[in-house]
Amino acid sequence: MEISRLKLSGFKSFVEPAELRIEPGLTGVVGPNGCGKSNLLEAIRWVMGENSPKSMRSGGMEDVIFAGTESRPARDFAEVVLQASDSEGEELEVTRRIERGAGSAYRVNGRDVRAKDVALTFADAATGAHSPALVSQGKIAQVIAAKPTERRQMLEEAAGIAGLHVRKKDAESKLKSTEKNLERLEDLMAGLD
Ligand code: ATP
C-alpha cells in the first residue's frame, strides 16, 4: 500500500485544515522541536484505527482534538483523511473523525464502516496502526528489546497475515454459536419424537 495524501483538521496541533502530499520514495519531515512532526505520524496511526490513547501520548482519545491556545478556542472535532493506493492500484480513502462526547466514526471511500473493518483493510495490506514501518521515537530500542512473541507479531503484520487471526477468531465464534444452535435443534427434535 502506498500512502499518497494525508489531510488533517483539528488534530492535535493541526488546528487549521492541512494537506500533505506524500510522493513515492523516502519522505522526511523536518522542523523545530514541538512543531508537530510526531503528531503527523500519530495521525497516520490514528486514522488506521489506533485505540490506545497512550500511544497517541494522550490521557484519553478526545485529547487528540485541538485543545486550544491562549488566542484560539478549542475545537469540537478532529478529522484525519488518508488516501492510498493498494498493490493493484485501487484508490482507498479512509476517514476517521472524533467528536467530543460522541467517539470515533470511520468511513472508507465515503461509506460508514466499523473500526474493525478499517483495521482489517490495513492488516490485509500488511500495514496498520502497529506496523513496524511507522517508526516513532524509541521504536528501535523497543524492537531490540521485544520478546519473541512480540517479534512474531511484527513479522506476521509485515507478512500481511495479521488479519487472518481476527477472521479465525470470528469464524471460531460463529462455529461455536452454530454448534449451540444445532444442539438446541436436536433437543427440540428429540422432544417431537
Ligand atoms: P520534537 O522534535 O520535540 O519531538 P515534534 O515536532 O515531533 O517535536 P510533536 O511532539 O509532534 O512535535 O508536537 C508537539 C506539539 O503539539 C506541542 O506543541 C503540543 O502542545 C501540541 N499538541 C499536542 N496535542 C495537542 C492538542 N490536543 N491541542 C493542541 N496542541 C497539541
Image (spheres, helix red, strand yellow):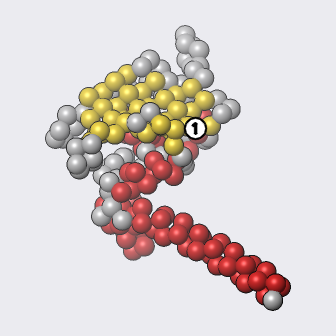
Q: Residue 22 at what x, y percent from top left?
A: 25, 33
Q: Residue 164 at what x, y percent from top left?
A: 42, 66
Residue 26 visible at all: yes
Q: Rate crowding at label 1 as few (under 14), some (14 to 19) or many (20 or more) other CA atoms within 10 Å.
A: some
Q: Residue 36 at what x, y percent from top left?
A: 39, 30
Q: Residue 138 at what x, y percent from top left?
A: 38, 51
Position above or below: 133 against 57: below
Q: Nearer the viewer, residue 63 or 138?
A: 63
**Label 1 amino acid?**
Ser
Residue 25 occupies which quadrant of the picture?
Answer: top left
Does any atom of ligand 1 lie closer than 8 Å to the CB of label 1? no
- Return the residue at label 1: 104
Residue under the point 53% across and 25% down: 66
Residue 154 visible at all: no
Residue 33 occupies which quadrant of the picture?
Answer: top left
Residue under the point 63% across and 74% down: 178
